[in-house]
Amino acid sequence: MEKKLPVPPFTLETAKQKVQMAEDAWNSRDPERVCMAYTIDTEWRNRSEFIKGREAVKAFLKRKWEKESDYRLKKELWCFMENRLAVRFEYEYHDDKGQWWRAYGNENWEFDENGLMAKRFASINDLAIKEQDRKFR
């Protein structure tokens, strides 16, 4: 059985650890690494896209990072209980035309007993920014 420590029920310390692990994985921009944190049948809502299953997550992330160059993300734990975390985040990237973007959002995560994320619901807003206004370098 796959296990991704820490597992629920979360404490403040383990919830923060889970968020930091997610931030580190996403900043690797490695779809294979990132998708292993999710259950085989994970359910996602990412903006207006609904994604089902680890393989679909991997394909989504591959497409995402092909379009979002120099991607850099920061996540912050908002609140937690038992097997659920709420996270606020922002990330920056530029598109193929050189336009920089900052995306702001919130995610709700639900984990199975093995610490794999079974559900991820993300609400995200994008803001065009100038390169000199970047926060993350």
Image: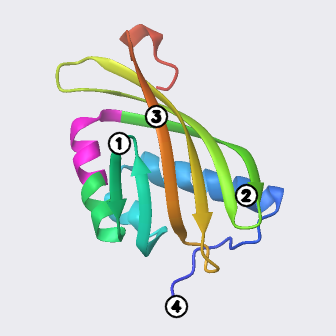
- Which residue is depicted at the point 68% across and 73% down? 7
- Secondary structure state at the residue bearing disc 3: strand
Horizontal and vertical percent position of residue 96:
18, 26
Q: Residues within 10 Å of mark 4 (few under 14, many from 20)?
A: few
In front here: 50 or 114?
A: 50
Q: Which mark is on residue 15?
A: 2
Q: Are marks 3 and 4 in contact (CB under 8 Å)?
A: no
- Secondary structure state at the residue bearing disc 4: loop
Upstream in the sequence, badge 3 or badge 2?
Answer: 2
Q: Which mark is on residue 1?
A: 4
Q: On the image, numbered disc 3 is attached to which residue? A: 124
Determine whether, in the image, residue 75 is placed left or right of residue 69: right
Q: Amino acid at mark 4?
A: Met
The residue segment tinted magenta is 61-70
Upstream in the sequence, badge 1 or badge 4?
Answer: 4
Question: In this rendering, which labeled residue sits more in front, label 2 or label 1?
Answer: 1
Mark 2–mark 1 Cα distance, whole angstroms, equals: 27 Å
Q: Residues within 10 Å of mark 2 (few under 14, many from 20)?
A: many
Q: How is the image coloured?
A: rainbow
Q: On the image, numbered disc 1 is attached to which residue? A: 48
Question: In this rendering, which labeled residue sits more in front, label 3 or label 1?
Answer: 1
Q: Is residue 69 magenta?
A: yes
Upstream in the sequence, badge 2 or badge 4?
Answer: 4
Question: In the rendered view, would you say 47 is above or below 93?
Answer: below
Q: Amino acid at mark 3?
A: Ile
Upstream in the sequence, badge 3 or badge 4?
Answer: 4
Determine whether, in the image, residue 94 is placed left or right of residue 119: left
Q: Are marks 3 and 1 in contact (CB under 8 Å)?
A: no
- Which residue is depicted at the point 23% across and 18% down? 98
Q: Locate residue 43: give its quadrant.
A: bottom left
Residue 30 visible in the picture: no
